[in-house]
Amino acid sequence: MSINLQMPALSPTMEEGTLAKWLVKEGDKISSGDLLAEIETDKATMEFEAIDEGTIAKIVVAEGTDNVKVGDVIAIIAEEGEDVDTAAKDSVATDSGTKENEGSTSKKQPAKEAKAEPESKDKPELKQEDAPEPASASKDGERIKASPLARRLAEQKGVDLSALKGSGPGGRIIKADIDSAKAGTAPVKSESATPAPSEKAAAKPTTDEFTVPHKSEKLSGMRKTIARRLTEAKQSIPHYRVSIDVNIDKLLKLRSELNASLEARGIKLSVNDMMIKAQAVALMQAPDSNVSYTDDAMIRYERADIAVAVSIPGGLITPIITGADTKSLSTIATEMQDLAERAKSGKLKMHEYQGGTASLSNMGMFGVTSFDAVINPPHGMILAISAGIKKPVVIDDSVQIATIMTATGSFDHRAIDGATGAAFMKAFKETVENPLGMLA
């Protein structure tokens, strides 16, 4: 019996994704563990491995297709000994949003989907102003069968889907049908009444209404998720911020000495590596800041897992240094370099960027002198690290030049009171200004 290969959930928050690239083609034999496709999730582009054995009988969703729902059938696998052509014809791969027919080999059902039912006054129909649907379009629930990509392209080009005959499986309208349609012909009509002039004036502008020369870039799944999560964070988490100036001269001197001793091992510590360690040590010294708030309980963590913001093409991701409070600086440096490289190439595994107990964002390399960061749920705090700037400061009642770095903590006031956040910032300052303690 053939196997319906479904769009996987590659992260806990993933509801849909982009099938970025197929790594197999129809007719290829596969085994468990073989790489099948690259899928762009709400976090990163990840490789999808096979868990079944067989032959790729049919690829249902073309590479480059956006908004593929988790659970949608993306390919058909013929099991060992099964005829590939028969599996491709008999298996049913349903559209997004319809009920999946797992393992179905019925030949009647596809024909039923493709058959248009006769017009009936007793049956809900599309509005009179809409063009009649062709036989290839489904009328179940007044829904025209079209791929998510085709629907988006139709909206952009002003093409009425009900005026097209789909060339895809079961009469489904696909990208090729939109490409062959005449742009601007039969514009899609709104289900709602035409808004009054005042409503139109209040509507948000579209990209077509901008008069300044520009180009419109499609939002990636990652960018949509960043927008959604940070909007939720700002709206639902009562942030407050505490800043403190830190003298990092001793830390820079220690870093130089350690790098000289680690050179033979091919390890080079960055200031960021030392900030990760300092934050983790401070969280152990001020454990009331190493928490997460939930509606039912306060989660108190017994180790410091630091989620570090890393900029990648199209957005950012936060790989995690687990147990940073107990790891050596050389181990943190080695792990962070590996995680950052794999983050930028989209090769992180789910457990490497899901979780953490607190976050760190470092913009010091850009010369930023001060900033605050948005808390990354479910964390209770995030630490923003700025550049070290040489300034005249008073040390032992005399004015001296020192390298001063401003660190700003953003805290969730539901979980961490002001004095508690201040205690963490004090512990962080003392750890950085007395860096030998990080080696103990």
Image (cartoon, helix red, strand yellow):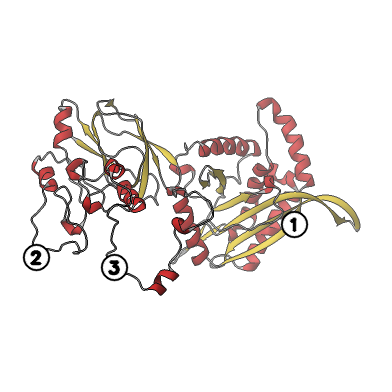
Q: Is mark 3 on a helix, strand or loop?
A: loop
Q: In which quadrant will I find the C terminus?
A: top right
Q: Which of 34 and 39 is in front in this view?
A: 39
Q: Is residue 439 above or below residue 417?
A: above
Q: Position of residue 15 (x, y in %)?
A: 35, 51
Q: Position of residue 67 (x, y in %)?
A: 35, 48
Q: Tell how many labels.
A: 3
Q: In which quadrant will I find the N terminus?
A: top left
* Badge nearest the viewer, 1 or 2: 2
* Badge nearest the viewer, 3 or 1: 3
Closer to the chain start, of discs 3 and 2, is 2
Q: Where is residue 414 in the image (x, y as percent from the top left)?
A: 53, 68
* Residue under label 3: 192
* Residue under label 2: 121
The answer for how far apart the CA atoms under marks 3 and 2 are is 21 Å
Looking at the rendered structure, which numbered label has been put on residue 245? 1
Q: Is mark 2 on a helix, strand or loop?
A: loop
